[in-house]
Amino acid sequence: MRLDLPRVLARLVLPGLVLACSACTLVRVDSHGAPPSIQSHGLIDGHVAVGIPAEDQLLRASLFDGRSPGAVGELVIWKLLRVEVGLAGAAIGIGPFDLALGVLAYEPRLPDYVEHEPEPADDDGPSDGEPEPYAEPGS
């Protein structure tokens, strides 16, 4: 009986590597206080998010820099397109959709999004910012 060492190593190492990689990654699904997103942090970093980007510049380009640590370059065209390339990964945003995946030194971050605050309730209180006068009980 001949023992084929590469085949035995592949059968032992590959499943162990898959288990180790999945054990080092935290996945979070969130929609409270931010746009709806699925985020992964750990050995594999990434996100999928939906929201309106808070980009106010018409065109922004950077080389050897970007929003995320490990980014090599970034190109942003207003709220329409965002492309960021890292050492081992990339991020792309088209309109309200943003997708990113990175490993090792590239850790993609979510772009800033427009926050929608609820409209203040229309009440009949004072409108000039002054506090309401004190009313004594029984009057």
Image: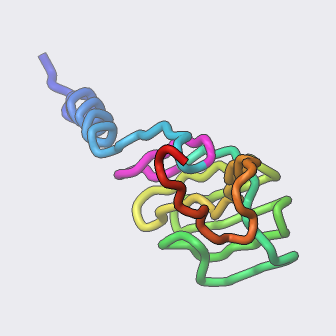
Query: Which residue reaches farthest front?
Result: 139
Left/right of residue 115 with respect to residue 1 in the rendered view: right
Which x, y percent locates residue 52?
75, 54
Whether residue 113 is visible, yes or no, is: yes
Q: Is residue 41 magenta?
A: yes
Residue at 73% in and 65% down: 54
Q: Is residue 12 magenta?
A: no
Residue extent of the magenta highlight:
35-46
Overall secondary structure of the magenta section: strand
Residue at 58% in and 63% down: 133
Residue at 55% in and 51% down: 101
Relative height, residue 99 to residue 105 (above, below): above
Left/right of residue 46 with respect to residue 118 in the rendered view: left
Of the 4 image quadrants, the one containing the N terminus is top left
Which x, y percent locates residue 6?
25, 35
Whether residue 6 is visible, yes or no, is: no
Which x, y percent locates residue 14?
30, 34
Left/right of residue 72 with respect to residue 102 in the rendered view: right
**Residue nearer the viewer, 7 or 40:** 40
Residue at 76% in and 69% down: 55
Query: Which residue reaches farthest left?
Result: 1
Relative height, residue 71 to residue 32 (above, below): below
Which x, y percent locates residue 43?
36, 52
**Residue nearer the viewer, 137 or 113:** 137
